[in-house]
Amino acid sequence: MFVTVDRELCAATGGCAQLCPDVFSIGADGIVVVTQASPDESLRPLVLDAADLCPTAAISVEH
């Protein structure tokens, strides 16, 4: 799995960082940063939930 965030689309709601702090964090500019682009498969459910809940569809997950 490979995770990316389109920082131009990010609305900085922070839901993804709250849901899956092992993969997402809030950068100094308030926009989400991916801290693990290739997280362990055990995190897949949380990453997919974060992507589904993103209000601007800024999170992409390649399987």
Image (cartoon, rainbow, N blue to C red):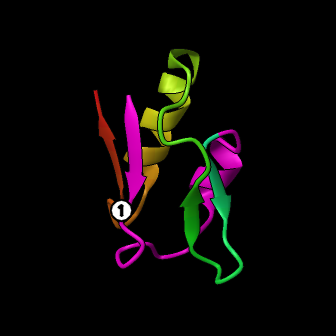
Residue with the most extreme left position? 62
> Is 37 contained in the magenta span?
no
30 or 34, which lies in front?
34
35 or 16, which lies in front?
35
- The magenta stretch is 1-22
1 vs 11, left or right, is: left
Q: Amino acid at mark 1?
A: Ala
Tag 1, which secondary structure? Answer: loop
Where is residue 31 drawn, in percent x and y? 57, 75
Where is residue 29 drawn, in percent x and y? 64, 84
Q: Quadrant of the C terminus?
A: top left
Q: How many labels, in total?
A: 1
23 vs 51, left or right, is: right
Which image quadrant is residue 32 in? bottom right
Residue tagged by mark 1? 58
Question: At 54% from the left edge and 30% from the top edge, which residue is drawn?
Answer: 39
53 vs 42, left or right, is: left
Which image quadrant is residue 33 in? bottom right
Which image quadrant is residue 13 in? bottom right
> Is 9 contained in the magenta span?
yes
